[in-house]
Amino acid sequence: MTNPIPLHSRHHSVLPDWLALYYDRPIELTHGEGRHVWDADGNRYLDFFGGILTTMTAHALPEVTKAVSEQAGRIIHSSTLYLNRPMIELAERVATLSGIPDARVFFTTSGTEANDTALLLATTYRRSNQILAMRNSYHGRSFSTVSVTGNRGWSPTSLSPLQTYYVHGAVRSRGPFAHLSDADFTAAAVEDLQDVLGQARGGVAALIAEPIQGVGGFTAPPDGLYGAFREELDRHGILWISDEVQTGWGRTGEHFWGWQAHAQSGPPDILTFAKGIGNGMSIGGVVARADVMNCLDSNSISTFGGSPVTMAAGVANLAYLLEHDLQGNARRVGGLLLERLRAIAAHVPAVREVRGRGLMAGLELVRPGTDQADPDAAAAVLEAAREGGLLLGKGGGHNTSVLRIAPPLSLTVAEAEEGAEILEQALRVLT
C-alpha cells in the first residue's frame, strides 16, 4: 500500500536536518538514460551535474549495467579477506594509469574515506600529524577530512586529530594575489608556503590539494603551481596528496588527472579518487608508492571497499571511457560549452566569471557592479534551470554563489547547446 504522506515530509521526519536538498520543491529522480533523468512526476531533465560528478559516462550505461548484473548473479560480497579478481583487475589498471611508480592501490567506498586513508598513510609515514591544506578546499565529511577542509560551510567543527596549516594559491581570481600575473601569483604562493612551513613545529606530513577545487566552486591555480610547491615540499621530505575525487578520469579534457597540469616535478606521492570511476556505484580509493602504502605496521581490511559488484562496474566503466575516448570528448565538447557560456555571460552583469576546464565549468554570480557573492541569485537560477529542464549544481567559497556544471563525459554537442540555451533563459531571472 502506498504511504499517503509526501516523500519530502517523510524525509524530514527520519533524516538529519543538515542533509541538504536542492530546490524549494525537492524532486525524486526515478530513472535515467544517457545524459537525461526523469522525476517521479514524469518530468525529463538534461543532467548537468551527474549526481555530483559521479555519473561519469552515462545513466543506465548498458556495459556497466550488464557487468553489475552478471557479477551480482555470481557473488555480491566477500570482503578483502579473500582473493577478488575484479578488484585486482581494476587495481592493475588504476595503478598503471596513475603515473605513480611502483604503485599500490587500496579501494574504499567513498572519496571521504579515500582522503581519510591518505591522511592516515601520510601521517604514519612521516610520523607527524601536521598537514598543509589549501584555503577554500573540501576533502570530505569524516572527522579527519573536515579538519583539512578550508571552507567553513562544510567544516562543522574546529576539533581535529590533525594540526592543519592553510596555504594560499588555489583560487586564481580572488584574494591577495589575484592582481598578479600567473608567474608572479605562483611565486607569491610559494613564498606563502615557505612562510607557513616556518610556522610548523618539526616535520610536516603532507600537502593535500584538489587540482581544481570542487565544492569550492571549480576554482584553480595557474598551471604548474603544485609542481612549484612540490619542489619546496621535496626539500623538506613532505608528501604531496592529490585529491582527484572530482578531477580524475579525464573530466578536465586536457589531462587524465588534474595533477598533470602541474607535472613538472613529477607525480604526487599519493593520489585519491572516487565518484566517476563507479558511474554511480560506491567506489573510492588511494594510489601511493609502495613504500608509502606499506608503511602501516598493523593489520587492516575493508569489509565493503573493493566489493566484487562495485569493482565489476569500475572495470566496465573504465574500459568504456578509454575505448570511447571520453577524455577527448570532454576536451572538445567542454571547450565548445565553455565558449558558449562565456558568450552568454558577457550579457549578464551578475556573472563575475566563467571558469573551468573540459566538462567542469563554473559560473560565479555576484551582485552586479560589485565583487560580493550572491547566493540568492545562484539559488534563483538553479530553480529556473530546473523549471526549464536542466539540473545544475552549486558551490563556492564562503557563500554558495557558483553554478557548477559537470555532465556525463559522453555529452553531445547538441546536448551542450541545449543546456546552454536553457541556462541562458534561466539567467534572465536576474535581470
Image (cartoon, helix red, strand yellow):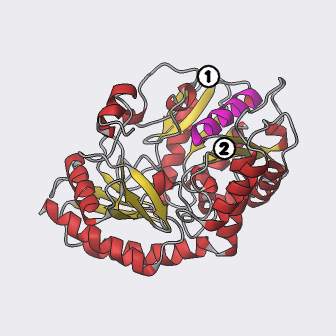
Q: Residue at image x 15%, y 61%? A: 429
Does residue 391 appear left or right of residue 324 in this picture? Answer: left
In the depicted structure, whether residue 28 falls above or below residue 429: above
Asked where in the image residue 279 lies, by quadrant, the reply is bottom right
Residue 72 at x, y percent in the picture: 72, 49
Does residue 32 appear left or right of residue 383 in this picture? Answer: right
Provide the major secondary structure of the magenta segment. Answer: helix
**SS assignment at label 2:** strand
Residue 393 at x, y percent in the picture: 37, 53
Q: Residue at image x 78%, y 59%? A: 93
- In this figure, which residue is indicated by the disc labeled 1? 201
- Indicate which disc residue 240 carries: 2
In the depicted structure, whether residue 139 falls above or below residue 251: above
Specify the segment rendered in magenta: 110-125
Q: Residue at image x 74%, y 60%? A: 97
Label 1 vs 2, first from the N-terminus: 1
Q: Which is more toward the observer, 274 or 77?
A: 77
Q: Residue at image x 41%, y 34%? A: 154
Q: Is residue 2 magenta?
A: no
